[in-house]
Amino acid sequence: MEGFIFKYLSLSGVFFILCCILKVFHVIWWKPKSLEKHLKKLGIRGNSYTLMYGDMKETKKLIAEAWSKPMPLNHAIVHRVNPLWHQMFHKYGKISLTWLQRRPRLIIADPELTRLILNDKNGHFQKPPANPLVNLLTLGVNTLEGEKWAKRRKLITPAFHHEKLQEMLPAFLTSFCNLIDQWKNLVGSKGSSELDVAQEMQNLAADVISRAAFGSSFEDGKTIFELQKEQAGLVLEAFMSIYLPGYRFLPTKKNRRRYEIDNKIKAMLKEMIQRKERAMQKGESKNGDLLSLLLQCKSHTNNDMKIEDVIEECKLFYFAGQETTANWLTWTIIVLSMHPDWQEKARQEVLQICGKKTPDLKDINQLRIVSMVLQEVFRLYPPVTGLNHERWTSKSDLA
């Protein structure tokens, strides 16, 4: 009897191991190759699947090559920003197949087709599943989907209404005037001075966000910005690596640093939020900034928004708002330096409309040439270069 039980358990163990092996084989090889075969039957050309990594190694190699050379000032940035996409476009056309580890991705570079896809109300596009370590950067509205996304977006939108932005103008002016005063002091009697424009714009954007969105200043949020920047580097490294289930729980040096940064940022934001709540209760705080509106939403009886959700939205706004704005302003200055004639036209327009007084909203709305320059830079150097959405995961969905 004991021999029979031992034999039964042994066979069960072997069967279980065999099932696990087959399952792993199906996930990491059979399913991706099957999808690849089906996509190519549909006429979609692209790269072949590489076990586990997909196009990850090729992407890293192409980025290293692109960044190893000086960037020519000719506005052709795709080969540097996303060299894999650039290569795929020239090799396979406006629709091509690439791989994010085991997941097939279609790169669509046709503006009309992209517009059609994004306007498809019945498409139910989803964001692709992210490496859990990537979520440490933020779990704000940009990561939500469906009804939860729509509800959160509806709550946040009032903070960006035209009237609210008008109320923030004094905070914007304070930040810009402080920057001009700093630059004047740097120039001094020498008449010129050299500085890192990118870093200056980072600090400016951080100060504007701190004042307009959180009612504080850059000095109050400086540590948060620095920690978010470090976290972004660690998150990018995690995104470009293969994630094994459970890896985020391993106490590696970088994992420990990722969670340490996350805990520090959350603690600092929680303290800022509690200060804001106390000030609002005492009537000592204006209610026009983003944080005040989020806290008003949180206190609403019919709303399920928690303080953790407010913290994640603050993390998103600190990071995404600073990076996009700072990069836009940096490239604007670079492009103006490349085109002195337009630089002079913009300067003369500002002097003609504003003179030596601090501009108000009416003055700003009359700056046509400045607006044209900003829009053109936004077109040439967009802060967001691509959108990722997921629609299907099996051959039956493609049929």
Image: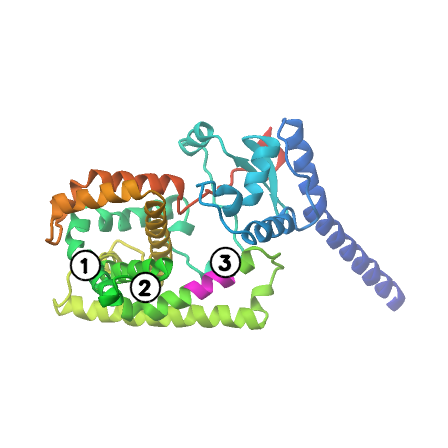
> How many other residues sit within 10 Å of disc 2, few (<14), some (14-19) or many (≥20)?
some
Residue identified by numbered label 2: 307
Residue at coordinates 40% horizontally, 44% vertically from top-left? Answer: 381
Position of residue 320 measured from the top left corner of the image (x, y, whole percent): 37, 54
Q: Amino acid at mark 2?
A: Ile
Nearer to me, 16 or 119: 119
Residue 210 located left or right of residue 48: left
Residue identified by numbered label 3: 134
Question: Most prominent secondary structure in the magenta stretch?
Answer: helix
Name the element at disc 2.
Answer: helix
> What range is drawn magenta here?
229-234
The reply to whether residue 348 is visible in this rendering is yes
Q: Earlier in the sequence, mark 2 or mark 3?
A: 3
Question: Distance between the Cα atoms at labels 1 and 2?
Answer: 26 Å
Q: Indicate how the structure is coloured in the image.
A: rainbow
Nearer to me, 21 or 347: 347
Position of residue 181 measured from the top left corner of the image (x, y, whole percent): 20, 64
In which quarter of the view is residue 305 placed? bottom left
Residue at coordinates 19% horizontally, 50% vertically from top-left? Answer: 165
Position of residue 95 measured from the top left corner of the image (x, y, whole percent): 55, 31
Question: Distance between the Cα atoms at labels 1 and 3?
Answer: 32 Å
Position of residue 195 measured from the top left corner of the image (x, y, whole percent): 35, 62
Q: Amino acid at mark 3?
A: Val
> How many other residues sit within 10 Å of disc 3, few (<14), some (14-19) or many (≥20)?
some
Residue at coordinates 72% horizontally, 42% vertically from top-left? Answer: 30
Closer to the camera: disc 1 or disc 2?
1
Residue 396 located left or right of residue 222: right
Mark number displayed over residue 171: 1
